[in-house]
Amino acid sequence: MQKRVFVGLSIILVCAAVLFTSAVIAEESHQNDLTAGMNIPETVAQVNGVKMNSKFVKFEFNRIMKYLKGSPDDKQKHDLVREIIDKEVIRELVFQKGKEHKKQVPAQTVNEEYEKLKSGYRTADEFYQALNHRGISEAEIKKSIETDIMARQLLEEQVAGKIKIRDEEVQKFYDTHKERFLRPEAFRAKHIFISIYPMELIKTATTAELDAKKDEYQAKAESRIQGIYTELQNGVTFEKLAEKHSDDQVSAKKGGDLDFIYKGVFHPNFDEAVAKLTPGQTSGVVRTPLGFHIIKLIETKPSEYAPFEEMKGAIQSHMFTEVAKGLIGEYISELKQNAKIEIYF
């Protein structure tokens, strides 16, 4: 039996790496230009005579560098800039192809997307200040939005109706890669949690303000949890204490119940404490970086394979995406072969 699988095409766009507009607007924090000294020219490339400005490339480089761990060397930085330029070239290529096919993006659609981006800011002035800080004009943002929408339309056409995933192919993938579907050991537990920092201050105080009094807050939190542990030993039920005292407001409403948790989700100190318990037993006070816990183990579940029917949809999505990446990759390669592309970096 054949089954067509249509997955959200945003996945495909991510794989093709052609959209930058949202990132350009969403990043609000002002930061130093880490491209200084890299000699990135104002025009980084030309695609069929259309010049590609470096401002979007520099922004994307800075955004990525902000979240990278470690310190990349000069070659790695250079390679990253080239990769970003290549992505911008692809965007422009697909946009030009859309224009060649007489595709149009209604001005109303562009304006609606533009207003959505603007609404992410508290005021219009704040939005325009962000644009000015990046050296990006309103017209450039709207052109970028139009490019993104055009790219989406064209790439969807390269995939729509061309991918068929058979049920037997899905079953074969599951059987061949069964180790991927092995779930780790799990346990169901309840806990009473006392945060190191007072919950009301976490919402309002800065990190520096909290750290300045960390020792004081920690001592008070430890005193609280010890008092709760004493009540527990004196016969007050775990569930009542969790509902009354726990800073984990979600589980507190359920008597501290965390439901099933896979080993490795919580801090190792938490897992180690659970490993020493048998169902029905309660731990002593357990310290983690977030605060203090008292844990009650309810039941354990051994490592097991996720059933095929449960994983079928995810496997279909994965297989669809892999085939789509291939189709789009071939399409983009063909566009490049038939285009005049000049890279200046």
Image (cartoon, helix red, strand yellow):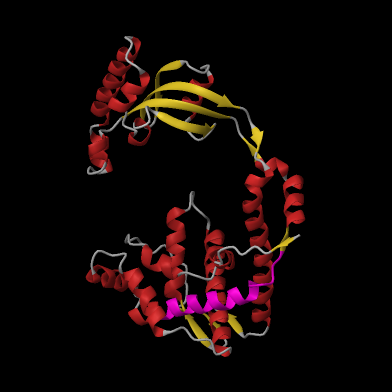
When the figure is inspected, residue 265 is found, relative to residue 72, above or below; the finding is: above
Query: Residue 61: x percent and y percent?
Result: 46, 64
Determine the image quadrant of residue 236: top left
Q: Nearer the viewer, residue 293 or 287?
A: 293
Foreground pick, 39 / 76: 76
Where on the picture, by quarter, is residue 53?
bottom left
Does residue 149 show up magenta in the picture?
yes
Q: Residue furthest top?
A: 234
- Tell me the quarter of the picture where residue 119 sits: bottom left
Give the quarter of the figure containing the C terminus.
bottom right
**Which region of the structure is painted magenta?**
143-164
For residue 37, say whether it is visible: no
Which quadrant: the N terminus?
A: bottom right
Query: Looking at the image, which residue is at 47% across and 72% down?
Result: 40
Left or right of 183: which side holds 151?
left
Horizontal placement of 328 versus 203: left or right?
Answer: right
Q: As drawn, is 66 to the left or to the right of 72?
A: left
Q: Main secondary structure of the magenta part?
A: helix
Q: Residue at x 35, y 10 (%)?
A: 233
Position in image of residue 100 (x %, y %): 57, 89
> Does residue 303 show up magenta in the picture?
no
Q: Nearer the viewer, residue 44 or 206?
A: 206
Q: Is residue 43 above or below residue 240?
A: below
> Going 32% across and 22% down the picture, which residue do you hit?
240
Answer whether residue 267 is visible to the viewer in this image.
yes
For the image, the number of numbered tags is 0
Residue 239 versus residue 318 in the image, above or below: above
Q: Position of residue 300 (x, y in %)?
A: 56, 25
The spot of residue 155 in percent (x, y) is 59, 75
